[in-house]
Amino acid sequence: MMKHVNKKPGKQEPRWQTKISGGNFVDKFHAYRNLHAHALFSSLGRLVASRFSSAMTIVVLAIAISLASGFYILVANLQQLAGNLEASNQISLFLKDDISEARANKFAGVIRQNPDIQDVKLITKEQALAEFQSYSGFGEAVKALEKNPLPIVIQVLPKNSFENEQALEVLLDDFKRSAEVDFAQMDMQWVKRLQSIMEVARRGVILLSLLLGAGVLFITANTIRLELHNRRDEVVIAKLVGATNGFIHRPFLYSGFWIGFFSGVAAWFIVTIIMLILKQPIEKLSGLYDDAFHVLFFGFTETLALLFISSVLGVVGSWIVLHFQLRQLKPE
């Protein structure tokens, strides 16, 4: 006669029960993944089905995004040009007549040790005279002079000369107080003007980006609102059978993602085409200045940032309208 053994509580669960629990988790993960994949590609299919209206929305958004991103690229090119013009804002130190070349070299070496200095160039009296003869047009008159009247000049290029105007003035005052320096010169007005222009441009990029970003949000929200209105019966039925808000939100959020993503791609092409059109005259102008600057395009990181921001704006705009519209949409 077989005896039935009752298992006491607290014993280890059978292996098959553990496997089923793990299997349930994996099944849930696969189901969750499949739902998102279905919503992702079904929303893309809906955009393709309504090609004309989708294309119109994407073009409008692409123009708005390209305005902001194009202004950003323009400022980036101006900053490159400003960086190359920085050498023209160097400080010129005219040394006293009694300063020998050896002492001038020693003084230039001391200046090079300053961490705020990017470059130091010493121009001897002979070099200054030769340069004056070449460019002044008074070569024959200079040869008649018995003594070289030109002083030794040290050209100093500060670091980040467009970022800290006060530090530049302090540096210039320090040079003026040096025993070796007879006269120190720098066009501070040019630096101030260029600093003001670049600051206005930077703030303009920020303000324009915020304004156009808000426009992208509203346009995307209105597009999703119209789609939600067209699919109202479908949403009501889904709510009647117990669908959660997350389930209802999902395809609309992916529609906003696709709209934002394709708008970012179109904006990238618009800005790139514009820069290609402008490249030849800009490169020609650069050649007149010894190839001092070249046209900058979107880099890899900037391209990813553009697509990411445009996609996020599309999703956020969709979520905003869904958050308020679904509250008002109740089954009767």
Image (cartoon, rainbow, N blue to C red):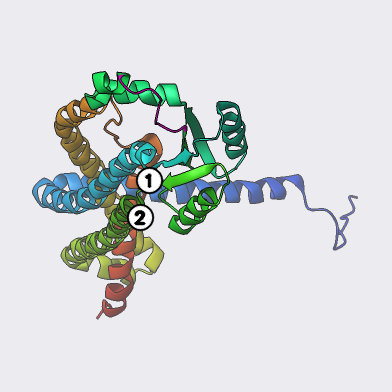
Amino acid type indicated by mark 2:
Val
In the image, which residues are magenta? 144-152
Residue found farthest to the front: 146
Determine whether 212 is above or below 85 in the image: below
Asked if residue 36 shows in the view, the reply is yes
Closer to the camera, 107 or 225?
107
Residue at which label 2 appears: 312
Please report the residue visible at 61 percent of the width from the left and 46 percent of the height from the top.
23
Whether residue 303 sits left or right of residue 281 in the image: it is right
Q: Considering depth in this image, is 174 or 86 the residue closer to the camera? A: 174
Q: Nearer the viewer, residue 8 or 262?
A: 262
Residue 305: horizontal and vertical position, in percent? 38, 46
Q: Which residue is mark 1?
A: 305
Determine which quarter of the picture holds residue 298.
top left
143 w.r.t. 242: above or below: above
* 151 magenta-colored: yes
> Do we see residue 253 in this rendering?
no
